[in-house]
Amino acid sequence: MSFNLFNSAQVVSKWTPGAWIGAVRRVFGTVVEMGESEVIENFGPHELVALWPPQTLQEPMLRRWPELVLLRPANEHSLDPLLAAMPGSAHLWMPDIEHDWAMLAEIVLLSEGHLLPWQQRRLQQFIQIERNQARQRICNSYGDAGLQALRHSMANAKQA
């Protein structure tokens, strides 16, 4: 997702000491559901937003468990809950790094009691898709094919 839309002075484009770390990802698009009275209802896209506290010299790596994870309607104010959860003058850095989005979605699924049934179903679908993609990446990168590629690159490096 492009963060050029966010014109907050708190959002920084590069890591700075003391910067909080945020992430936003669309988890599903527009949803059309049959309502209770057989009325078709439309719901807009939703995204996960997550926030981690600043990294320190004692903990320079991004922690697995974020401080905050929310499911919310996608809009131009996606960062508002992140900015509201940070100390007033703190900066927010939105790095383009991989996150365990399946785990983040599962945190929401298990911890937010107000999710509607259609939101729960869509989150479950998202989690399954993410886990399948992770399994495929593991097989491609770390299975026999991944080991063969590593051995081939090491052999080429020795010849160079």
Image: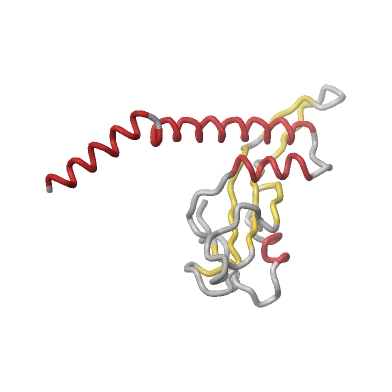
Judged left or right of residue 157, residue 93 is right
Which residue is at the far left? 159
Residue plotted at (75% across, 32% down): 118
Q: Quadrant of residue 6?
A: bottom right
Residue plotted at (83% across, 22% down): 38
In-front residue for pair 22/45: 22
Give coordinates of residue 121: x percent, y percent. 71, 30
Q: Quadrant of residue 53?
A: bottom right
User: Coloured how?
Assistant: secondary structure
Give coordinates of residue 91: x percent, y percent. 60, 72
Residue plotted at (79% across, 32% down): 117
Please say if 4 is above or below 65. below
Which residue is at the far top? 38
Residue plotted at (80% across, 36% down): 116
Q: Quadrant of residue 11?
A: bottom right
Judged left or right of residue 79, residue 119 is right
Question: Is residue 7 in sight in this rendering?
Answer: no
In-front residue for pair 141/98: 141
In-front residue for pair 155/118: 155
Please say if 97 is above or below 130. below
Question: Is residue 91 in sight in this rendering?
Answer: yes
Please say if 80 is above or below 123. below
Give coordinates of residue 34: x percent, y percent. 77, 25
Give coordinates of residue 73: x percent, y percent. 69, 47
Q: How many marks?
A: 0
Which residue is at the far right? 37
Judged left or right of residue 80, residue 26 is left
